[in-house]
Image (spheres, rainbow, N blue to C red):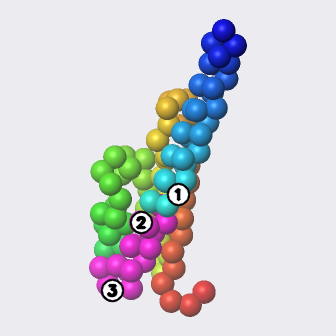
């Protein structure tokens, strides 16, 4: 009986943990994409395309790539079990070519 009463709290904790994992994974993907874009930029290729090619298909929908000078900035929305929460979340990463 006590377990049944705690079930809603366990569900909320599970959703929070799932969301935190999704945010972390999206942050890693954004960093990888920014790095791929910077490497392409250094080699004279299309940085935005390289950044988009570096991530799985599902993550491209909420992804933005900005190339400014020798810097590549990637932002994306992590997946979320709650649609309203997912709209407010965004992670990003920046990679630069050459000296700072």
Identify the residue at image location x=38%, y=50%.
59
Q: Label 2 to label 3, Cα distance in Å? A: 15 Å
Q: Position of residue 75 (x, y in %)?
A: 50, 57
Q: Name the residue under label 1.
A: 27
* Dot 2 crowding, Cα within 10 Å, few <14, some 14–19, many 20+: many
Please indicate, yes or no, whether residue 87 appears anywhere in the rendered image.
Answer: no
Q: Name the residue under label 3.
A: 43
Whichever of callouts 2 and 1 sits on the residue coming sooner in the sequence is 1
Identify the residue at image location x=65%, y=16%.
3
Q: Which mark, by number, is residue 62?
A: none
Q: Is residue 36 left or right of residue 94?
A: left
Tell me the SS state at disc 3.
Answer: loop
Q: Where is residue 19 in the image (x, y as percent from the top left)?
A: 56, 40
Tell me the SS state at disc 2.
Answer: helix
Q: Give the range drawn in magenta.
A: 30-45
The picture quadrant where one finds residue 47 is bottom left
Quadrant occupied by the C terminus: bottom right
Whichever of callouts 3 and 1 sits on the residue coming sooner in the sequence is 1
* Dot 1 crowding, Cα within 10 Å, few <14, some 14–19, many 20+: many
Kindly report which numbered mark, 3 or 1, lies closer to the viewer in this rendering.
Answer: 1
Q: Is residue 73 left or right of residue 16?
A: left
Identify the residue at image location x=31%, y=74%.
46
Q: Which mark, by number, is residue 33?
A: 2
Q: Label 3 to label 1, Cα distance in Å? A: 24 Å
Give the answer, above or below, for where 6 lies relative to 30.
above
């Amino acid at each position: 009986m006590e377990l049944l009463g705690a079930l809603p709290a366990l569900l909320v904790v599970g959703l929070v943990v799932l969301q935190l994992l999704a945010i972390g994974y999206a942050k890693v993907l954004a960093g990888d994409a920014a790095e791929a874009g910077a490497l392409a930029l250094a080699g004279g290729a299309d940085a935005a395309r390289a950044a988009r090619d570096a991530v799985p298909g599902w993550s491209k929908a909420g992804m933005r790539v900005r190339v400014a000078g020798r810097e590549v900035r990637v932002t994306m929305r992590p997946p979320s079990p709650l649609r309203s929460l997912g709209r407010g979340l965004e992670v990003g990463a920046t990679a630069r070519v050459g000296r700072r």
